[in-house]
Every structure is written in C-alpha cells, then in structure tokens.
Amino acid sequence: MKTISRRTLLATTAAGLAASIGGKAFAGASYDPGSSDTEIRIGQFGPLSGPVSSFGVLANAMDAYFRMLNDTGGINGRKIKFINYDDAYSPPKSVEAARRLVEGDEVLFIAGAMGTPGNIAVQKYMNARKVPQLFLAAAASKLSDPAANPWTMVGGSTYEIEGGVVGRYIADSKPDAKIALLYQNDDAGKATLSGLKTGLGAKTAQIVCELNYSVGDPTIDSQIVQMKLSDADLVFLITIPKMASQALRKMAALEWRPQVFLGAGNASVRATLKPAGFATAQGILAFATRMDPGNPLWADTSDMKQYMTFLDRYVPNADRADDLYAIGYTAAATAARVVSQCGDQLTRANILHQASNLKNFAAPLLIPGITLNTTPSDYVPIKQFQLMRFKGEAYEKVGELLTAA
C-alpha cells in the first residue's frame, strides 16, 4: 500500500521507513516486557466464537492494520506482533485471555479489546499488574475512570456522555415533545438513560412512558403498543440493533410515526435499518462519531479512500459495509499513534502517559471535526457527535457537531 492515513500515521510510517529493524541497538532506549529493539507485542481479546462472533472482525481489521505497518517498516524501526484470543463474549474467558496475554505472551499493552462485560472483568487484574488496557470497544464509564483504574481507557465515548448529548438536543430542539423511552435493562441501558435524563434537565418531566426489556426477551411488541398508547410523539430507543429493528417494524404496523432517535450503538444501516425496511426508517435521527463505510456521503473523503484501499489489499474478503472493520481500523491506528509518540521509551508507564495526553488527534474514519482528546484526569477520548437524519437509503448530516457539556 502506497499511503497510510495522512492525518494519523504520517509521522509513524516515516519513522518506520527511516529506521533499521535489523537488530540495531537503540541508544538510551527503555523497555518493559513486550518491547525490544526489534519488536512490540500488543494484545487483544474478543468474541471470535459464540453468539456475537460477528464482532470478531474487529480483531481481523486490527491485525491487518499492523501487518500494513510492518510492510512499511513498522513503528520507529520495530515490527508489531499482534496477539489476540477468543473469549466467546464470556467474562471468565476474558480473564483467561488477559492473563495469557500478560503472563504468557508478555504483551506491552492491550488495545481494542471487545465488549463491556469482559473488559470490566479483567480491569482489576490489569490495573493490579499496571498493564495498559486501552482504546476498548466498550462504553461503560467505569472503564474510563482514571481515579479508580488509571490503566484502563475506552476508545470512544461513554453511554452517559452520549445520553447527555441526546437529552440536551431534545430539550433544546423539541421543547414540547412528549417523550417515550425504551431501554435495555442492563448497565449499558441504565447508564444511557441516566445520561439522557441529566441532559433533559427540567424537560425530564415530559417523559410520558419509560419502559425496558431484558436481553433474552423474544419481542418488544407489547412495549411499543404501550408507548403508542402514551400519546408520545418522540421516542428514543436505547437498544441493541435487533430490538431497534423490531421496534421500527411494529411502529409501522401500528401506523404510528413519532420522531425516533437512535444512538451510536443501534443506528447502523446494515444491522438495524435495512432489516426493518428503509420505508419504516425515513426521518430517523441518530448520533454518530465515525464515518459509515456504506454511506456514499463519505466515499470521496481521503480517509475513506485510503480505508478502502487498505481493505482491498489486506482484508480482501471483508464486507465493505460492516463498520466493525472500520472500528478496528481506527483502534489500531490510535494504538499505533501512541506507540509512535513513545519513541524509544517503550515502557508501560510511557504508553499510558501518551494515551492519556492525546491532543486533537484526528484518528482515521472519525467524522470530520471530531478528534480524540484525553488528559490524566479525563479518559473519555470522544465528546463530540454528529446528528444524522436517514433519508432514502443513507444518512445525511444535520447541522454542526454537538459537544458534551
């Protein structure tokens, strides 16, 4: 591949191409387990099997990204060895995988691990061992709490922050709305709900219906009927994609057309709107942080062109519309940026220092204007969202970026 994202790894690849990897000693270099003059080991775990094995493509994208870097000389003259294990989305297996990565493979750090339950399960262990657990594909606020767990950081935003942005937008733009909420009855759903109510402020009094469902429920039809009977004219679905599709189909069957809001986790055209039927999805509003590879809106951006070239060469069988590949690509690029900034001081403490001091880093495939920013006291990299409206068969931008309070 001739180029890598101009915004993310220009310095990284230039350094990699300029440095020798043939066993050369780096004067003044410092190393922790997982790093040397020639190699840097990065670990990851996630569901390669089990009920959500489709999420495993995130690891495939990360592996391909590091192979691409290695083909251009690595990072600062060192090749990346990416090691990932299957946890089948089972927290006990996540713990086994983390221990194997830290104690067996001796990785320098873990990046892009998939799933909130598994990352929470290993968090205490990773912090006790002082091994960075970074840029996680999870959004629980407890995974970005530097005071309690300084070695753990999410890769994007948190449920509470996203909920807060949605709530403030509704309070400002729909001040007279009668609001109905449906949320998944788990930590993620409750956290988003809490953020939403904080953002609504005094407008919380306009919630006329608040319902939930459990992960194992076969249908949410009865909840949608109750929401319609509440006479709500605005609905926020805090659900997984499957349940959001069900909700949209049931609303259409009931000939009920409230203004529907979706979050970053269930707004996918591929996973939610297409199964529901595009006719039922017209006018839906959603909050996004990343470009959707399947949306023609982004097709001519340099980031998307480079991403598609990357897929053509390194993941030729990838589903181009599957945004999980894109999430893995962004996570790997962010991890590579941190390693690059470490220079020859490849210690776990320096990895953490660089990760917790990101300044306006425009990681590849983020919506233009959205950047990653962290400080030692603030471990939430993304606090900006783009409002999107579904029209025809794709989303279009609505207004300017929305920023968390």
Image (cartoon, helix red, strand yellow):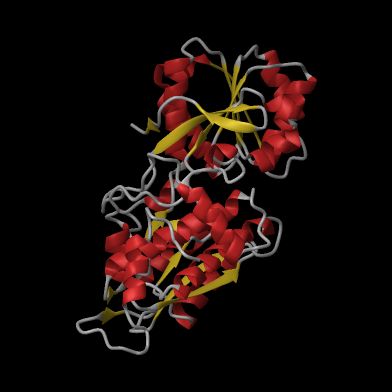
Residue at the spot x=62%, y=22% of the render?
Answer: 283
Residue at the spot x=32%, y=78% of the render?
Answer: 19
Residue at the spot x=76%, y=26% of the render?
Answer: 250
In the picture shown, does residue 11 fall above or below 361? below
Residue that lies at the very extreme toward the front in this rendered image = 2
Between 47 and 117, the one lying in front of the other is: 47
Residue 41 in percent (x, y) is at 43, 76
Residue at the spot x=45%, y=80% of the render?
Answer: 103
- In the image, taking residue 37 as reference, residue 94 lies left or right, namely right
Between 353 and 51, the one lying in front of the other is: 353
Across the whole image, how many numbered discs are drawn on residues? 0
Residue 299 in percent (x, y) is at 55, 43
Residue 339 in percent (x, y) is at 34, 67
Q: Is residue 195 visible?
A: no
Residue that lies at the very extreme toward the right in this rendered image = 253
In the picture shown, does residue 42 fall above or below 89? below
Residue that lies at the very extreme toward the top in this rendered image = 176
Residue 375 in percent (x, y) is at 27, 51
Q: Is residue 169 visible?
A: yes
Quarter the C terminus occupies: top left
- In the image, taking residue 344 as reference, residue 4 lies left or right, namely right
In the picture shown, does residue 308 fall above or below 48? above
- In the image, taking residue 201 as reference, residue 284 lies left or right, namely right
